[in-house]
């Protein structure tokens, strides 16, 4: 199955140590996306970076410092993204949210609704 | 598109055990021909033979030979053969390539219209498009990871560059949270491929994505390419371009 539509992509940048109600912030946002039925959400861990406050973030592969830069990409139709934005406002205390309009093609297997993979 | 009439039959002679980056040469050649939209190709295995090194290769019950002669054959138009011959020669290594004039009496039937081959190494600057493909790391295409097959397909079609990112967490079309567990086998992640090229080239590549991606998301956005610098591959290429950029950004991964 293939569908094509105009949508919006948000990218949120923050640190791996950022938390929301005790949970890692990226896990909390991802859970919220899933609850709202957002089409695609993916978390990337950067190797090095800096954000608000110019604090350098580095992923600690060999040390115990773990505040790696995190980038979360979320893609869906405009109206779905609009539903998510108020939650992001509340959850992201320190970070950057960038949005861009995109053209989306979505491929799905016929049996994808049940979450079963052949 | 193959029409009845004059065409070229290409035959490549290889030995079975020959590998290139750990992959059997015949399979990388076959992949390349497929990605470049060649009308059809066949790999045949010989029973016995010898090559340039004059070593007799044969199969017998005593020694299980893995160096049997192999033959790859395909028929295409002169233009198409000319377009891919350079890369073929590179892939075939020490093997022999033969071109033969032939006549197509009746081309094989195809169910789908074929894509056109985009011009190679187009210089991109200014308006361009970014294509991102979101997949599961487990997705496979012909027994290899799908993301890997897509990268090979993009390379074969001269897409300017592509990078694969592995997500640490994510979910996609099948609504399952993928979580990267560093201590366990972490092959259950979400991955993203990000490629940049002109809109025309990416659109020309799209039919192949259509066929290869069963489940996933493809996202296009407009970008401005500020700089597209590349390292000259060899001395000849360096000599051909009068001023090779010295501090080239590594656009390709």
Image: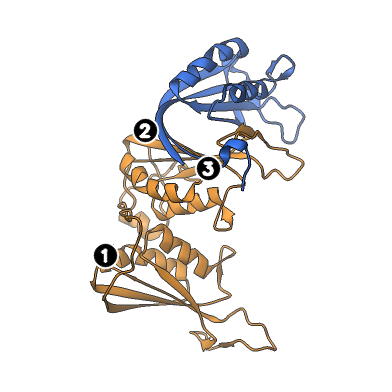
Asked if residue A69 is positioned above or below residue B253 in the image, the reply reads above
> In this figure, which residue is indicated by the disc labeled 2?
B226
Front-lying residue, A57 or A3: A3
* Same chain check for tags 2 and 3: no
> In this figure, which residue is indicated by the disc labeled 1?
B79
Subunit under mark 2: B
Compared across the picture, whether B82 is left or right of A115 comes to left
**Colour blue maps to chain:** A
Determine whether the residue tagged by mark 3 lies in a helix, strand or loop. loop
Asked if residue A99 is positioned above or below residue B211 in the image, the reply reads above
Mark 3 to mark 1: distance in Å? 40 Å
Q: Is residue A14 visible?
A: no
- Density class for disc 3 (Cα within 10 Å; few <14, some 14-19, many ≥20) is few
Compared across the picture, whether B47 is left or right of B83 comes to right
> In this figure, which residue is indicated by the disc labeled 3?
A110
- Please name the residue shown 77% across and 29% down the image: A64
- Density class for disc 1 (Cα within 10 Å; few <14, some 14-19, many ≥20) is few
Subunit under mark 3: A
Q: Position of residue A106 (x, y in %)?
A: 46, 37
């Amino acid at each position: 199955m293939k569908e094509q539509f105009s949508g919006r992509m948000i990218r949120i940048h923050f640190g791996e140590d950022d938390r929301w109600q005790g949970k890692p912030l990226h896990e909390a946002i991802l859970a919220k996306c899933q609850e709202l039925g957002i089409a695609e959400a993916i978390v990337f861990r950067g190797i090095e970076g800096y954000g608000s406050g110019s604090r350098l973030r580095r992923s600690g592969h060999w040390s115990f410092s773990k505040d790696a830069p995190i980038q979360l990409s979320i893609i869906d139709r405009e109206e779905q993204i609009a539903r998510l934005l108020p939650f992001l406002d509340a959850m992201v205390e320190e970070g950057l949210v960038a949005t861009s309009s995109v053209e989306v093609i979505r491929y799905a297997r016929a049996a994808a609704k049940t979450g079963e993979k052949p | 598109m193959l029409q009845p009439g004059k065409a070229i039959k290409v035959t490549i002679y290889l030995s079975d055990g020959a590998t290139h980056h750990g992959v059997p040469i015949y399979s990388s050649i076959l992949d390349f021909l497929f990605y470049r939209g060649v009308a059809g190709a066949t790999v045949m295995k010989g029973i016995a033979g010898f090559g340039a090194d004059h070593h007799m290769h044969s199969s017998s019950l005593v020694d299980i030979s893995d160096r049997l002669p192999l033959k790859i054959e395909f028929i295409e138009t002169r233009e198409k053969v000319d377009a891919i011959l350079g890369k073929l020669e590179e892939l075939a290594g020490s093997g022999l390539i033969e071109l033969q004039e032939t006549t197509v009496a009746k081309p094989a039937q195809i169910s789908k219209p074929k894509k056109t081959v985009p011009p190679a190494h187009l210089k991109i600057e200014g308006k361009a498009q970014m294509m991102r493909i979101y997949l599961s790391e487990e997705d496979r295409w012909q027994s290899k990871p799908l993301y890997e097959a897509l990268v090979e397909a993009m390379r074969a079609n001269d897409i300017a560059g592509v990078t694969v990112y592995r997500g640490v967490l994510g979910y996609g079309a099948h609504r399952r949270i993928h979580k990267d567990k560093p201590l366990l086998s972490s092959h259950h992640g979400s991955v993203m491929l990000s490629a940049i090229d002109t809109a025309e080239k990416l659109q020309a590549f799209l039919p192949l994505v259509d066929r290869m991606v069963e489940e996933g998301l493809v996202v296009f956005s407009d970008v401005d390419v500020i700089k597209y610098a590349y390292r000259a591959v060899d001395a000849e290429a360096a000599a051909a371009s009068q001023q090779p950029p010295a501090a080239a950004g590594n656009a390709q991964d």
